Structures are given as structure tokens and as C-alpha cells.
Image (spheres, helix red, strand yellow):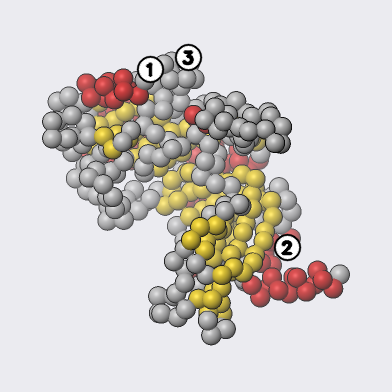
Amino acid sequence: MKSQTAEAAVDDRLTPICSIFDSISKGSVILVEFENLLSLIRFESYHAYKRGSGWTRINRHYSVPSWNRQLPNGHGIKEVVTSCIYGTHRLDFRRDPEFEVYLPQSFDKDMFLEPVYVLEDGTTCIEAKKLPKVFTDINVILGRLEAFIRPAYLHNVALSFIEGRPTRYKVPRWGNHWFRRISLSDLHKRYEMSTRGIKQGHFVYVGCKEEVYLLCVARDLCGMPFMQGTYTTSTKPIFYFSNNYLDFISRHEAEKPKFRGGENDLCNVAVYRTYDIPELGGKPFIFPQMGREQNCKNTIFTGEPQLITGNLDEALAHFQTTDFAEFSDIVEKYAATADFIHPSFVRRFEYFI
């Protein structure tokens, strides 16, 4: 008992949010509100600990070198207090600075924060902006979500997550097939043919029921669509809507069979996956995700495009047949502001991907 009391006392000194998690039982749904991020997490456990500066925790297993060695005022940092909120499932809503909507996304199941620093002179510095608000009462959580999330999405996705049941959504497909029936180069050729006549920088819509991409045509010196490796590029940051799995799992990864070998057997990760797909209610939890860039989870043309057009009226008519119809105002504004690039989006290459 003495050791437990001593450990609790140390935790209280580590970070002001430690005591919040003492009464939260495993499996409970919590809402973590942090800067411009709302995170629904099915809680597993909480842990806080000190580590030397120069390292940042990125997941349960790995840390990476970091520049957290000095505060902006020049004071040197000796140790960093890492707050680890472990979860079994996590669904984020991150504010988009251009459209001022909270975009639903999921790339991890845990949350790692660094709100407290121990300086080289022995003093402790708490950064208030890095301290999240944590809500545990379901009615309060629903009230907070209602203030930021659109009604249909709240009912169809957030409520399903809270109640632990699957949604009605399906991941993008090719006709009646889950697997892509043609090569990536054939897809790029189709995009090139469909966008002929659309000038550099003009709006283009690529969509099917479970997936929509908004972009502005980017061309190379020969007038062909400009490619960045295997990614299609855009003169304005790409905006996508796509039904996805929770966490980092992409459709490509989900299609791989689960590795069933023994503990010491080698696994060819190009063929198998070594992890489970997050499920709720006995089925994978699939939700409409909205984002700003292509990545390994969500590359363009995941599903079979039903329409590729630069005509806004055609795009809006098709968008009403998709799983994202509640967000048609984003399509209209994106097309109307093809020349506007929000200052928070930095172009790393010649165009955006």
C-alpha cells in the first residue's frame, strides 16, 4: 500500500492531468480536447514518466530524436514529462483552417503529450496550451461533439463509436470487386484523358460513392499531369473524402491475410499483416474520413472513379449520391477558391500531393 501511495504522489507531481484518469475504467469512452483537436478514445490506461530531452514518444514501442532541448526563451530542458493516454480505438476531429470544419480522421489509437518540462536549473515548467481537457460523462461528450460536428455525422459515426457498434459504411471498391482491376498507370492515363481541356490550376472532381477527391490540375512542361513519384499532384492542396478503417490501416493493408505463424517464424510483411483490424461490435469500424493530403493510408484512386469532371454542377449532382453529401458546401467553396492557398499549408515540392 505504501508503494502505491508513493507512486501516486510522484504521478501528481509529474503532470496536473494524472489524477483525472484514476477513476476512468478500462473500455470507457473519453473525449480529449487539445488545441484544435477533439479525440474520442476508448480508454485502456494512462501512464506518465520522465525522459531525457532530445527524444519524443511517437507510439507504444518507439521514440524518435527531437528538438525539445530548449524553450523559446532559451532556457535549457533537462527532462520531459511524457503523458501516455493508451486506447484501444481512437477517432479524431481536427479543425481545418480553410473550411473551418473539424475533419474526422484516425491515424493512431494512443495519444502522447509533453505538457511538463524539468529545466536544467531544477525548476518545473508547465505549458498550459499542452494540457488537454478530458471529458468522461457521455452526455457532456455528446454536447461537446454537437458543437463542432455536423448532425448526420454525429449520429451515424460518433454515436456508433461511443456505443461500440459498427457503422453502415463500406470501403471504396471497384464495381462489385474489392480489389483494383487495373494498374496504377492505367488509372493515371484515365485521369489524363478525362482532364484534357482543363487548364492548369482549374478545379477537377474525382468521385465514387465511397470516395471523392478535390484537386486543381497541375501539368508538367509537356502539358501532361505532373506526378510526384506515384502521387497525383495539385496546384491547390488536395482535399479528400474516403471511407476508411480506424488507425493507420489502409484498404491495401486490410486486404492482406493475417500472419498465422509461430512466435519465431519470419513474416513477409509485403504479403501479410501482423496486426488486427480494429473492430467494434464484431465488425471493422469503417467511417468517412476527410483529409488534406495523400499518404500511405489514402492514395488517390483507392476506389473506381465514377466521375472525373471539371464541371461544378456535375460534381455537386454526383456528390449528393455519395456518403459525404452533408459536406457539399466544401466542394462548392473548394471550386470557387482554386487560386487561394491557406498560409498554413506549406508546399514542400513543386505542387501539392
Q: Tell me the number on the disc at residue 176.
A: 3
Relative depth, front residue between 14 and 263: 263
Residue picked out by circle 1: 182
User: Disc 2 residue type?
Assistant: Asp
Judged left or right of residue 9, residue 348 is: left
Please say whether residue 208 is visible from this viewpoint: yes
Pair 1/3: label in front: 1
| Residue 111 image position (x, y, % from top left) | 57, 55
Percent across and percent down for residue 25 are 74, 53
User: Mark 2 sits on what residue?
Assistant: 22
User: Which residue is at 65% across, 45% downward?
Assistant: 88
Residue 215 visible in image: no
Residue 304 rendering spot, x and y as whole percentages? 39, 21
Mark with earlier residue (2, 3): 2
Residue sitting at the far bottom: 121
Percent of width and height locating residue 74 = 41, 79
| Viewer-side residue, 120 vs 332 | 120
Distance from disc 1 to disc 2, alpha carbons, whole Å, reads 53 Å
Looking at the image, is mark 1 or mark 3 earlier in the sequence?
3
Residue 187, above or below 213: above
Residue 75 against residue 310 in the figure, above or below? below
- Density class for disc 2 (Cα within 10 Å; few <14, some 14-19, many ≥20) is few
Quarter of the C terminus within the rendering: top left
Q: Earlier in the sequence, mark 1 or mark 2?
A: 2
